[in-house]
Structures are given as structure tokens and as C-alpha cells.
Image (cartoon, grey):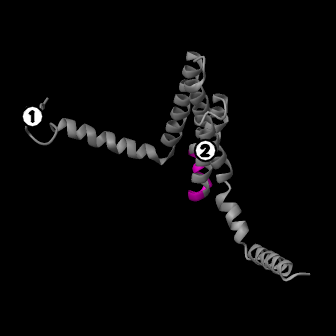
Amino acid sequence: MSSKNDMKLGLFIICAGLFILLGKLGVFGFLGRALWPLLLLIPGLILHVFVFGRRLSPAALIPAGIMTVYGLLFGLCNTFGWWMMAYLWPVLLLGIAVGLYEYSLYASPRSGGLTVGSAVLGIVSLLLMFLGVLGSGFIYIVGAVLIVAGIWLMLGRGGRRGRYRRGW
């Protein structure tokens, strides 16, 4: 064997050893657990680039929008905790709405029905998310803000100079 082939074989053996050691130390497991949402986000962004670069038809915007939104959602939940999914599950519907809305904007024969349908689905998704958050402890914050706003209005928006200074 020549010295050039010995160098290639030696480099291959070193890389294999490093790969095995890093695997046993849990580096690849950590990366797999932490970065798997990128497997959805990056292809979604690449599909967007291909569509806007006119290499793919606008129909590819449907899976592109869905994959991008889902990748962001799963990345958020993976980073801050999966308990958030109890409140953010309507974002799954929002992903479909985003994909359909993008397609309706860039499709050749524009369809108003698809635009309206995707907008309705997006509004329903946001409404469901808002109602889910209200069902949690967030309702106490809303109640406190309403009380403060009512007191502020009753006191005349900053003191005695207000509209209600004479009383009832």
C-alpha cells in the first residue's frame, strides 16, 4: 500500500473512533433530541426558496407552510417544554391555514374561496388558542386588567379633571 492510501485509511479509522466515542458520550443523542424540529423547518424553508425562485410550482407552498409552522411549533415546545402543547395545539390548524393561504396568494388562477377558507381556518385556530389560554390562569390577569381599566375610567382618566368628576 502506498503512503497516500495509508493516510486515507488512518484518517478513516480516526473518524470512526471519534464517531463511536461521541456516540457513547451521548453527543448524538442530545443533538437528536434538541435539533429534530429542524428536520421539518429546514425543508419547509427550502421549499419556499424553490417556489419563490420559480423552480417549483406554487402548489409546493402548501407543504412548505405546514412544515415551517410545525417546525417552529415543535422547536418552541422542544425548547421550553411540551406542556405548552396543551395551549398551542391550535397552531397545528394554523399551519394548514398558512400553507393554504400562501398557495392561494401565488396560484395562477386565484381562488377567492381558498383565501377565505384559509383565513377562516386561521381565525378559528387563533380563537381556539385564545380560549385555551383563557381557560388557564390567564383569566385572572384579564380580570385584573379589566378592574384596573374600569377604575381608571371611573376616576376620570387620571384624576379629578375627568368626565365623571361630579359623581353619579
Tell me if 84 is positioned left or right of 59 in this view.
left
148 on left or right of 34: left
Give the camera-side residue of 98 and 52. 52
Asked if residue 133 is positioned above or below residue 113 in the image, the reply reads below
Q: Residue at x 59, y 42 (%)?
A: 69
Q: In which quarter of the view is residue 97 placed?
A: top right
Secondary element at tag 1: loop
- Residue 139: x and y, percent? 44, 43
Residue bearing the label numbered 2:
45
Task: Out of 29 and 22, give the one closest to the viewer.
Answer: 22
Q: Which residue is mark 1?
A: 165
Q: Quadrant of residue 95?
A: top right
At a point 55% along the width and 30% down the height, the residue shown is: 122
Q: Say which amino acid is labelled 2.
A: Leu
- Residue 80, x across and y down, in percent: 56, 57
Q: Is residue 121 visible?
A: no
Indicate whether residue 80 is drawn in magenta. yes
- Give whichever of 160, 15 is nearer the camera: 15
Residues drawn in magenta: 79-87
Earlier-in-chain disc, 2 versus 1:
2
